[in-house]
Image (cartoon, rainbow, N blue to C red):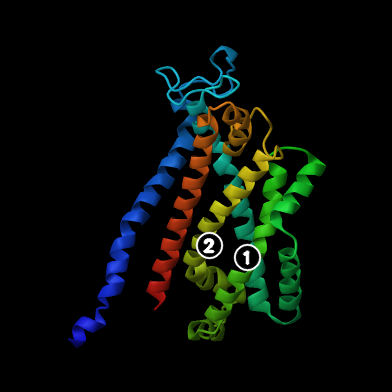
């Protein structure tokens, strides 16, 4: 009986139940990434070719998912739009993670007044919504992908730095850090060789979740007409362009990019949370 209780069958059943969902979401993420990479070769048509004679036509042999109000092939724009829709969040996550990790490690390792200054500075960013910051910057510099990516990266940076700071503080209290210091290793060497590899799985899991949030934010900006230029295939822009089609009873060109956004965000979040759970179980 004791052995049975120690095995915690309930937890084992939970892991078994969640495993299929994780595998499905991981497969979907891989599929979306491959579609984005191979879009120029697998797209059935040029996504920007306009044919007003076929405007709002339904699915057919020539257009498998129909066309939008401008007569552009919906499938081609979905595949090509995956590139822009994933590239923007990737830039947000890359910049915010690298900068946030640098700030968090510095604050936790140096401590003292530098920790206070860096922590208070990042807390100021929390008081300003990231999406609003992106809207303000885009209104100044005009539409495009660079301005909103940088604005959202700055907005996401405090979340990464706060997480990194707490993880580094926990690692610094462990005996191995003191042992390396006694052996004469510098703080930079200890952080790069031992501390950062130890916290990397948690930071990467958080980056995966942040990717989904960034995808939503950038799609929202494109929907408002503040993201990519009008002719650039993008899922958020496709929803914006599909508004007129919905009003005329042809929702497919707007519904499909909405589904692509929702499913991609959910898939990235599930994969990120799964990685975080695996790290937590490993550290127990």
| Front one among 11 and 46 | 11
| Front one among 253 and 80 | 253
The earlier-in-sequence mark between 1 and 2 is 1
Residue 28 appears in which quarter of the rendering?
top left
Q: Residue at x 70, y 46 (%)?
A: 148
Q: Residues within 10 Å of mark 1 (few under 14, many from 20)?
A: many
Q: Residue at x 79, y 43 (%)?
A: 139
What is the x, y in percent for residue 255?
Answer: 51, 36
Please determine whether, in this image, residue 20 is positioned above or below residue 71: below
Residue indicated by mark 2 = 206
Q: CA distance from mark 1 to mark 2?
A: 9 Å
| Front one among 17 and 172 | 17
Residue indicated by mark 1 = 159
Please determine whether, in this image, residue 200 is positioned above or below residue 44: below
Please determine whether, in this image, residue 25 is positioned above or below residue 35: below
Q: Is residue 71 left or right of residue 60?
A: right
Q: Residue at x 39, y 51 (%)?
A: 25
Please determine whether, in this image, residue 251 is positioned above or below residue 72: below
Q: Residues within 10 Å of mark 2 (few under 14, many from 20)?
A: many
- Determine whether the residue tagged by mark 2 lies in a helix, strand or loop: helix
User: Which corner quadrant holds the N terminus?
Assistant: bottom left
Badge 1 vs badge 2, beta-carbon distance below 8 Å: yes
What is the x, y in percent for residue 51?
Answer: 57, 14
Farthest residue to the left: give it: 1
Q: Residue at x 50, y 31 (%)?
A: 252
What is the x, y in percent for residue 235?
Answer: 57, 37
What is the x, y in percent for residue 243?
Answer: 62, 32
Residue 143 appears in which quarter of the rendering?
top right
């Amino acid at each position: 009986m004791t052995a049975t209780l120690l095995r915690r069958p309930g937890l084992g059943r939970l892991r078994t139940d969640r495993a299929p969902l994780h595998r499905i979401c991981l497969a979907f993420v891989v599929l979306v990434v491959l579609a984005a990479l191979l879009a120029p070769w697998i797209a059935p048509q040029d996504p920007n070719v306009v044919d007003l004679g076929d405007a709002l036509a339904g699915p057919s042999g020539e257009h498998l998912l129909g066309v939008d109000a401008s007569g552009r092939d919906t499938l081609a724009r979905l595949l090509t739009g995956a590139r822009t829709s994933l590239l923007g969040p990737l830039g947000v996550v890359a910049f915010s993670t690298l900068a946030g990790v640098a700030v968090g490690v510095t604050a936790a390792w140096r401590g003292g007044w530098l920790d206070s200054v860096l922590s208070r500075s990042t807390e100021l960013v929390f008081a300003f919504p990231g999406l609003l910051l992106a809207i303000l910057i885009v209104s100044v510099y005009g539409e495009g992908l660079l301005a909103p990516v940088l604005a959202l990266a700055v907005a996401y940076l405090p979340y990464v730095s706060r997480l990194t700071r707490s993880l580094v503080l926990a690692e610094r209290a462990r005996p191995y850090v003191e042992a390396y210091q006694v052996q004469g290793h510098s703080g930079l060497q200890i952080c790069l060789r031992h501390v950062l590899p130890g916290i990397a799985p948690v930071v990467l899991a958080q980056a995966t979740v942040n990717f989904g949030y960034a995808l939503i934010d950038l799609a929202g900006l494109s929907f408002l007409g503040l993201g990519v230029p009008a002719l650039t295939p993008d899922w958020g822009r496709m929803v914006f362009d599909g508004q007129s089609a919905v009003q005329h009873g042809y929702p497919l060109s707007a519904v499909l990019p909405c589904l692509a956004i929702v499913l991609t965000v959910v898939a990235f979040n599930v994969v990120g949370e799964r990685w975080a759970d695996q790290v937590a179980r490993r550290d127990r």
